Each structure stands twice: as structure tokens, then as C-alpha cells.
Amino acid sequence: MNKFQLTVLIAALANLALMLIFPPFNSQSLFRAGPASFDAFYPAFDAPVGATLNSGLLYLEIFFVLVNAVLAWVLLQGVPQQPHSPRVRWQNVLQWLVIANLLVILLFPPFETQPDRAFEGFRFALGGSVQRGIFLPFLFLELFLLALDAAALWLAFGLVTRWDVADGAESFVPGSIAEAGAAPDPDRSQIGRSDHDRRQGRDPNFGGPERRKGIERRK
């Protein structure tokens, strides 16, 4: 698990915690007979008297969070050579997920019943009838949470990238450069001929007497 996948896991847990702290509740209207309908999101520890948990809507929210988390986890998986870097750029992954969620929200918006304007459920946008209208408060809430999650993940992924770059720059100390700076090159430490110059010894290709006697002036 790399740092990008850990960020996705933290974001998914934060969304699940928010959904469990503020779950959807149903209420029974005094002016309408029939089953209870969606009322609002209340704190789980301070729900109104008589309100019942809308388990279907809560399961649907948890399902979409898990689907997004799994998709992001798979797309941000590291390559075998570099397990800490994602296979796909995190900017592209986040853009694709935002576009996919936006299409799902707009294609299956929340509808309300007429004329009491109560939340009915999610229906296909192109298959609605004139007796139903879009439940705008729920739609605006979905768009707001999508934008909030996208902005938070964009900032988190940016911080993770900066930390990786900073850690790589600090830990990159080439051994050859360090050794080259610590120990001078013996071939370049002296300018001119050394004491092992071949012309100071006897030439193996010359069989006659050596003419260079004493101290050579070019030494």
C-alpha cells in the first residue's frame, strides 16, 4: 500500500464516519397516510422522537463510497519497479472519478412526489413523468459533497507528492560523487611527468648503450 492508497483509505473512512454520525431518517407525516418517507439527516445520538432510520438510503450511500474507494485503490496501485508511485497519475484518477460520479448524479437524480414535495427516490432522469419533479435540496447536497471530497483529495494528493519529492531529494546522495569529492584522483593530483615516467628507464627496444646519464634536464 503506497501513500496515495493510504490517503484514499483515510478519505473513505472519513466519509463512512460522516454518514454513520449523520444518517438519514424517515418520519411519518400527519397529513399523509401510508409508509414513512425521508425526512432529513440528523445526528445519530440526537434523532427526533418517532424518527426511524432510512436503512435503504444509508446502504446506498455506503455502497457508493466503497465503490469509489475500490476504484481509486486499484487505479493508484504502484508499479512493480516503483511500488510507492501510482501506476496512473493521481490527477487523472481524480478527474475520472469526479466525472463518473457527476454523470451518475445527473443521470439518476433524486425525485420528489407531487403535490406534497416529499423525497421519493432516485430515478432515471430521462424516464421521469410530469407527476414527479427533481428534489433540489438532495441534489444540491450531493453536488456539494462531491465538490468537497474532490477538493480535499486534490489537496491531500498534492501534499503526498510534495513529501515524496522532498524525501527523494534528501535521500539521494550518489556514492560515486561522495567518494570522488572525498578522495582526489591520483591521475590528476600531479601536473607533469611523475617519477614513473617511462623515459627514465631503459628502453627495451634499444639494445645499445644508454645515452641518458645522470639527471635529465627535462625531469
Image: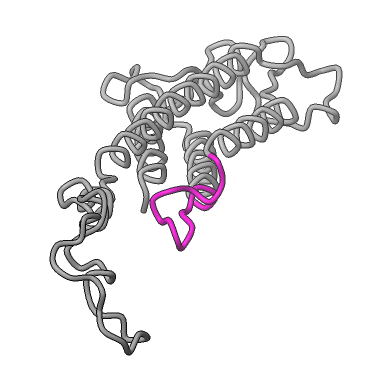
Pick the residue in front: 181 or 195: 195
Q: Nearer the viewer, residue 213 or 153?
A: 213
Res 172 → quadrant = top left
Relative to residue 152, is residue 71 depicted above or below? below
Q: Decide if residue 141 is on the left or right side of residue 8.
A: right
Pinpoint residue 52: horizontal percent, then vertical percent.
Answer: 42, 28
Residue 117 rendering spot, x and y as whole percentages: 67, 11
Question: Height in image: 59 above or below 33?
Answer: below
Decide whether the magenta segment is chiefly helix, strand or loop.
loop
Q: Is residue 175 magenta?
A: no
Q: Quadrant of residue 199?
A: bottom left
Q: How many marks?
A: 0
Question: At 67% across and 10% down in the image, what residue appears?
Answer: 116
Residue drawn at x 31%, y 34% as measured from the top left? 166
Q: Is the residue 69 above or below the residue 119 in the image?
A: below
Residues in magenta?
A: 74-89
